[in-house]
Amino acid sequence: MTELVLVLSDSFIPLKSPDIDPQFKSIIMPNKVQYVLCLGNVINQETFDWLNGLSSNLIIVRGDYDINKNYPEKKSIKIGNFQIGMIHGHQIMPLGDLDSLSNIQRELDCDILLYGHTHKLNIVTKDNKLFLNPGSITGALSPLMEDCFPSFMILALQDNEVIIYSYVLSDRSKKFEVGHVEYIKGSNELKVIQKVSIENIEEENEENEEDEKINNEEKNDVEKKEEEKTNNEKENNTQEENIQDNNDKKVIENEKEDTEEKKNKDE
């Protein structure tokens, strides 16, 4: 089964942005993904509640503006065959530096390192590891970026393969753009792919669940028939045993009668 993982960061609501764009919210619906990984700067309770309602598996690392000290600075989580590391990124110097990120990757011993803070979507590999920055989901302004466009990612993990769906709203008056990139665990190659969508993966998961349901029903039917067969055999055996018992009783009674009759004759 394919695991779907929402990756987002730096919402900054209401400090730098009023809300998440409705176009994004129309895609990011409750129970559409198995995991939500947030890379910090959640800021307000309303955003946390929205994230928490998307999936029962919500993990957040602390950003430089988060006041919730319960969020960890770093986190590593196993999803499918991938070990995924998380850090906000303000700890990285120089900011967004790939060599510094590689040090964190080795520290967390992960296949994929997720980071934020730069507000710029980025997909890159180094030393056979994958580094992903989902950008800012609200396009919050940053002194590090001249233009900040709203963006986030959805990862589709299956076996040793991950497809990265990047959603970018480059013009707020238009629809978002979606990029599809494929990565194989342990490689440095990124492959741009076409004609794959989250909807197709969801349909495939639903088909797999339906197939599993049918297989379970068929299995239950076979087990039920086997049970009925066993019960019938037991019932037949019981009937045969009862018949045999009756026959034995008749034989004993007949023998008893013959013995009494013979005794009476002798007398």
Image (tube, rainbow, N blue to C red):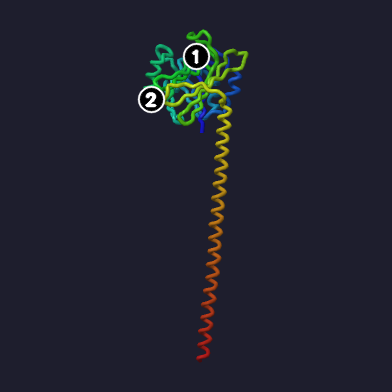
The mark found on residue 208 in the picture is none
Q: Is residue 111 left or right of residue 255?
A: left
The amino acid type of the residue labelled 1 equals: Lys
Up the image or down, 213 lies above or below 203; here it is: below
Visible residue check, residue 14: no
Q: Residue at x 49, y 24 (%)?
A: 182
Q: For this rendering, which residue is in front, 199 or 101? A: 199
CB-based contact (under 8 Å), mark 2 and mark 1: no
| Residue farthest right in this picture | 173
Query: Which residue in the protein does label 2 denote?
Result: 109
Up the image or down, 49 lies above or below 257; here it is: above
Q: CA distance from mark 2 to mark 1?
A: 24 Å
Disc 2 crowd rating (10 Å Cα; few below 14, some 14-19, many 20+) is: some
Determine whether the residue tagged by mark 2 lies in a helix, strand or loop. Answer: loop
Q: Is residue 243 left or right of residue 104?
A: right
Q: Residue at x 54, y 53 (%)?
A: 226
The mark found on residue 120 in the picture is 1
Q: Residue at x 57, y 34 (%)?
A: 206
Determine whether the residue tagged by mark 1 lies in a helix, strand or loop. Answer: loop
> Which is nearer the N-term, disc 2 or disc 1?
2
Expressed as whole percent of the image width and height from the top left, the position of residue 205 reads 55, 33
Expressed as whole percent of the image width and height from the top left, the position of residue 31 reads 56, 29
Expressed as whole percent of the image width and height from the top left, the position of residue 21 reads 59, 17
